Amino acid sequence: MGFLTGFEKFVRTAEPLAMHTWFQLGGPAEFFAEPTCRDELVAVIRRALEQDMPLRMLGRGSNILVRDEGVPGVVIVLAHPSFCEIRVDGTSIAAGAGARLGRVVTTAVHAGLAGLEELVAIPGTMGGALHGNAGVHGSDIGQWTAAATVITDGGEIIQRNREDLVFNYRSSSLDELVILGARLELEEDDPRELARRMQKQWIVRKARQPMGHQSAGCIFKNPPGQHAGELIDSAGLKGTRIGGAVVDPLHANFIVAESGCTSNDVLRLIDLVRDQIEQRFEIELEQEIEIW
């Protein structure tokens, strides 16, 4: 049986991934699946496993750089409304993995639930935020996560409760094949005060990030007690260019892709910055962005 048999309605071949990522770079996916329900999702996962094909989950592509040659195997996107539902129940909010993190935050704020408002300017989906424990200034999504629903490597749907979960800086123990969604336990607060804090955080974050350019999120994780952007700035690397890739003059932990840029340009610039920081400060920067 060919991989596509029976999946023609929601699986495409040679899908350009550049249009699905913030960098707008990189080659195609061998197979690109947009299931419309859990049954289709589980079916495509099981067939990929049976045929020993690589599987990747793609959210909004804000933390991904796809190589120029593209991606073998299956890339799955949970963009259908059935994977994006957001529900509020008392002080709990449940969200599907495909829900945009910004929408989850604003839904909580409007319901008078505190804890997520500082995450409002972080792009991406709920699934990606849980997998990478998205956060800012010591606040992260993991501290509010009470349970998560996942699909295991065997294609089984299970729930992982708080005692089974570990969240660290930009990482989590949610390493199953697929995250389907999560339930967050938040705290009651005045919706007007929450809205004020959320708006302030949005303005501050957006003022520090490149706007109107092809880019992604932060390239490197912050070393303990330091900021990667400040180290890169101190090394005089703002504005450094390789091909069409440039270290952002506003925030040095961002790389922007100008006209004619390739993924290889960005990869070479990442290597140059990492090498320079290690030579000058004896600090090895760890990538925050994922390379496919």
Image: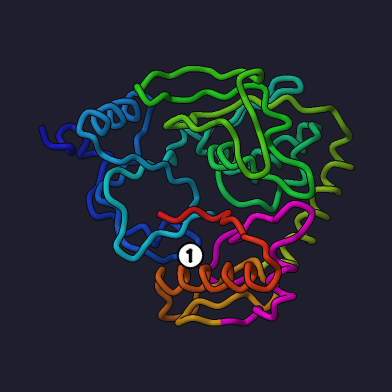
Q: Main secondary structure of the magenta part?
A: loop
Q: Is residue 105 left or right of residue 180?
A: right
Determine which residue is flagged by label 1: 23
Instruction: From the top left corner, tell me how far across and down residue 82 is, in percent.
Output: 45, 31
Q: Is residue 130 left or right of residue 176?
A: right
Instruction: From the top left corner, tell me how far across and down residue 217 is, in percent.
Output: 59, 59
Nearest the eye: 138 or 190:
138
Residue 217 colored in magenta in the image: yes
Quadrant hosting residue 292: bottom left
Instruction: From the top left corner, tell me how far across and down residue 209 is, in percent.
Output: 68, 66
Instruction: From the top left corner, tell me how far across and down residue 140 is, in percent.
Output: 72, 40
From which residue to which does the magenta span run? 211-240
Quadrant hosting residue 129: top right
Q: Quadrant of the N terminus?
A: top left
Instruction: Please tell me which residue is depicted at 70% across the width and 20% down the height of the picture.
Output: 89
Amino acid, disc 1: Phe
Nearest the eye: 13 or 272:
272
Label 1: how many residues lie within 10 Å, few (<14), some (14-19) or many (20+)? Answer: many
Residue 60 colored in magenta in the image: no
Nearest the eye: 228 or 111:
228
Instruction: Please tell me which residue is depicted at 74% across the width and 49% down the height of the picture.
Output: 136
Q: Is residue 111 above or below residue 204?
A: above
Q: Is residue 214 left or right of residue 239?
A: left
Disc 1, SS: loop
Q: How many marks?
A: 1
Q: Is residue 236 left or right of residue 83?
A: right
Q: Is residue 284 above or below residue 197?
A: below
Instruction: Please tell me which residue is depicted at 62% across the width and 82% down the height of the picture.
Output: 239
Instruction: Please tell me which residue is depicted at 22% across the width and 28% down the height of the picture.
Output: 50
Q: Is residue 168 above or below residue 150?
A: below
